[in-house]
Amino acid sequence: MGDRVVNGCQTVEGSIYIQNFTANEIINLSGLQRVHGDLIIDGNRGLTQIILVNLAQVDGELKLKDSFLLKRIDFPKLTSVRSLELSILPLLETVQFSQGLSEVVDAITITDTAIKAIEGLTVNKVGNVSIANNVNLTRIDLSHLEQINGVISISANSPHTILDLSSVSSLFQGDFRHVATLLGLNRVQKATGDLSFISNQFATLSLPNVTEITGTLTVSENKQLTNMSVPNLRALGGALAISNNTNLISITGPNLEIINGSIEITGCFEKIDLPKLSNVQA
């Protein structure tokens, strides 16, 4: 369905697919307010501008992908989508959710863009989050996010990336890589899957309220890490894997009792103190 057809529509009952726009094209959907299906804008390598000034809700997937000339996109009224994907947009520097994107049911995917900051994502729960390969991205503000029902994966963004997860209390699985500053995880009590912290730049990793990790805890290649704190962790369902954290010289787990996987600890440590550990299954 072309933009000339839907521009006069406020509501579309089905889905909208826009593909193969050529050089210096503009997609004008200024009249569109709601899409009951998906809104897919994919493979428009000549696209320079998208106008979606009144779009408030997409009941399905909102996907913007593979547009090489697009530098900016604004969603001044968008508050709800089932899933959001922004990917392979090498010149895209700015995305604005002025009203605050407060509902994303399934997934947020932002990969391979030139975005410098992610702001206006005010969702408090989501399925999966994947933010990767955005080389200019220095701030990821997910400070409203409380519940992650799937996997959160952050990797290969700017080496100066600040990640704010300060409200997260429920987490299924997390993979954090190449993060300079990690704000949050202080409220998390349990991770239902694996937790991985690999090749980050932060000096302190603190999980003060985590009592159980059902999967494996991996802390590896964090060259600036000097302090790792898991004071209330009692049980690991998988392995404990700590390796090649050059400046980490002490590991303490004062309440860790059970590890159902292996223990793999490598490095030059002055102290490894796991006084209550009595049950290692591997």
Image: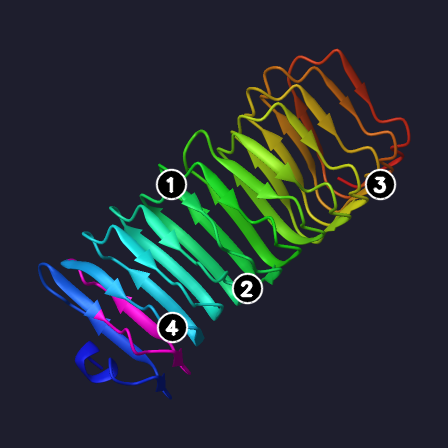
Question: Which residue is at a point 78% across and 48% down the rendered structure image?
Answer: 189
Residue 122, x across and y down, in percent: 55, 57
- Label 2 with label 1: CB-CB less than 8 Å: no
Residue situated in front as seen by the camera: 171 or 212: 171
How far apart marks 4 and 2 lie (CA) works out to 14 Å
Mark 2 is on which residue type? Answer: Ser
Q: Nearer the viewer, mark 2 or mark 3?
A: 2
Residue under label 2, please give it.
Answer: 102
Q: Circle 4 sits on which residue?
A: 55
Numbered mark located on residue 4 in the image: none
Q: Secondary structure at mark 2?
A: loop
Label 3 sits on residue = 234
Is disc 1 surrounded by few (<14), some (14 to 19) or many (20+) residues within 10 Å? many
Magenta stretch: residue 32 in it?
Answer: yes
Distance between mark 2 and mark 1 Cα atoms: 21 Å
* Amino acid under disc 3: Arg
Q: Is residue 143 left or right of residue 254?
A: left
Numbered circle sitting on residue 116 = 1
User: Earlier along the polypeptide chain: callout 4 or callout 2?
Assistant: 4
Asked whether 79 falls inside the magenta stretch, the response is no
| Residue lying at 41% horizontally and 34% vertically, measured from the top left | 158
